[in-house]
Amino acid sequence: MTLGKEVLATYDSMLTGDILFERSITPMVIVDSQRIMVKANIRFCDLFEYSRDEILGQSTAMLTPSLEHFESYKRCFERTRDGSLQSRDLLYRKKDGALFWVKLTGIPIVTDAQQFVLWSFDDITEEVDEREEIMDGSRELENIYEKVDAGFLFVVDGVINRVNQSFLNMLN
């Protein structure tokens, strides 16, 4: 069975442009060279808890925790605008003020009239929290390992990987 030209044209139009942008499972926004939001998909609005009317035409500064954050994020924006794909973990703010972490990935879109950047946002708050928990546990273990006046020895598969100073002092 072959598909007719009309059906293929319909599929082609469904997979390009607005419908692909709008129905993406990834939150996305397009910003202009002044970092003004010119287009956002529904997932983006859901993530940040704003309606399109509230964000379109506004600076991305409204999404950052502070003006200092907005200015520091400028380097990522400029690198992306210069033509390279950029991806970074950054802190953002929802409409209600709640802070959350995203993996921000941007790619330039160049038209005859102007240059834009398409940004995608992946909420990685849980991942960042888990990383911080692991780091806290690691710091705690490091303190115990170094400061407790008892000999510690770390063995993996019968091989001594690490000893603390107290252990070495016990052995002279």
Image (spheres, rainbow, N blue to C red):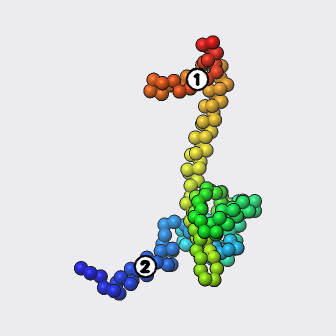
Near mark 1 (Cα within 10 A), the count class, few <14, some 14-19 or many ≥20, is some
Residue at (41% x, 80% y) in the render = 12
The residue carrying mark 2 is 14
Query: In the image, what residue type sits under mark 2?
Result: Met
* Figure quadrant of the N terminus: bottom left
Q: Quadrant of residue 28?
A: bottom right
Q: Quick one: label 1 or label 2, which is nearer the N terminus?
A: 2
Residue 52 appears in the picture as rendered: no
Total marks shown come to 2
Judge by depth and name the residue closer to the eye, 81 or 63: 81
Q: Position of residue 31 (x, y in %)?
A: 63, 73
The residue carrying mark 1 is 163
Alpha carbon distance from label 1 to label 2: 62 Å
Label 1 residue SS: strand
Q: Position of residue 65 (x, y in %)?
A: 70, 59
Residue 108 appears in the picture as rendered: yes
